[in-house]
Image: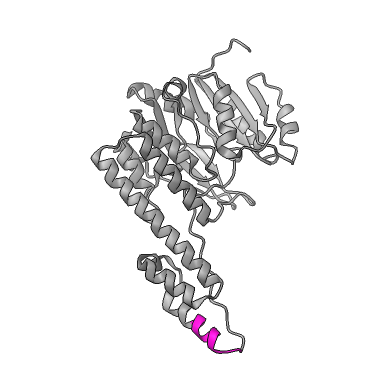
Amino acid sequence: MSGFVPDVTFVVAAYNAADTIVRAVESALRQEGVTVEVVVVDDRSSDGTVEIVSTIADPRVRLIALEQNRGPGGARNAGLAAARGKWIAVLDSDDTVRPDRLARMIERAEKTAAQVVVDNLDVVSLDGRSVRMFAEAELARQPLLTLPAFIESNVIFRSQHNFGYMKPVFERRFLEEHDLRFDEALRIGEDYILLASALASGGRCAIEPSAGYIYHIREGSISRVLKLDHIDAMMSADEAFLRRYPLDVLSERMQRKRTRGFHQARSFLLLVEQLKSRSLAGALKAALADPLALRHLHMPIVVRLRRLAARSANTAPMTAAAEPPPLGESPYTSKGR
């Protein structure tokens, strides 16, 4: 298979994915109408993932076992470096794809002269129920994904239709010509930066309205709760992105909205930390620093602050305030690789 040049390389970064990796790989191998290879990059798993992948008796599957854990971005970059296909598709190790996905997406990309293509998703919950993420009619009205639309859809707290969930397929030559890779410093949000960089580099991104990617929610891999260090890392990545790419006026406006969203999220997380620690003074300080952060609390802030004040004034046990909800699942969180 050394001279084999497939239409598509699937890059599957895997970390402790022994229970789902075969399902993911087999779904990639079942693609119809295109030739494929699957590059599985094991990110120092401890559960037998390497051994399981090694037993897959298909010459189209290649295994790269990293010597040290590099995180999702690093593992995917190792896969990109090994890819031989004309197109590169990233597949999470606990997700699957429908058999006609890549044929549809490549056809869409070729018709629109696009270097990148995204499609719809079905989200499968723990009880097996499936929900379509975007209305196909809505996506059909938007044949191309522009940089301003993509940035605006990734404004934390504000976005109704977040295109950051989509799993792009890239033309390998385009990635190489523009030196585009995943940001290995990011543990959350690395997908966003890569697609934004591709669009900022002049990439044309087609939208396939049908759902070919199946996003599986499973026990033990549900999105991590966003933390302050995640926000800080993503803001740093955005700053590097802005230094590298000059933006048009509309993209700059959307980027300002995204930056404001990050600042608001940071204020919200600081406020939550103070509420959890039962610090009345700290909570008041955080609330006054950014009053807009208050509207994201599940319980009215006044009730929380009253409870904190009562707790500080009385020694009798108090009923604890309800835990604030997680910041929410978004492209800024990761359910695993």
Dividing the picture into quarters, in which one does residue 92 lie?
Answer: top right
Q: Is residue 219 above or below residue 294?
A: above
Which quadrant would the C terminus be assigned to in this image? top right
- State the predominant SS element of the stretch in magenta: helix
Q: Is residue 270 above or below residue 114?
A: below
Rendered residue at 58%/34% (across/down):
74
Q: Position of residue 135 (x, y in %)?
A: 37, 44
Can residue 167 be spotted in the picture? Answer: yes
Q: 246 and 146: which one is in front?
A: 246
Query: Residue lying furthest left in this view?
Result: 249
Q: Position of residue 80 (x, y in %)?
A: 54, 26
Q: Position of residue 64 (x, y in %)?
A: 66, 27
Dividing the picture into quarters, in which one does residue 91 lie?
Answer: top right
Q: 24 and 318: which one is in front?
A: 318
Q: 320 and 242: which one is in front?
A: 242
Q: Is residue 68 above or below residue 259?
A: above
Query: Residue lying furthest front in this view?
Result: 243
Q: Is residue 38 above or below residue 141?
A: above
Dividing the picture into quarters, in which one does residue 202 lie?
Answer: top left
Q: Position of residue 167 (x, y in %)?
A: 47, 36
Q: Is residue 36 magenta?
A: no
Rendered residue at 70%/30% (across/down):
53
Q: 40 and 226: which one is in front?
A: 226
- Judged left or right of residue 308, residue 19 is right
Can residue 210 be spotted in the picture? Answer: no
Boundaries of the magenta span: 307-315
Query: Residue lying furthest top in this view?
Result: 3
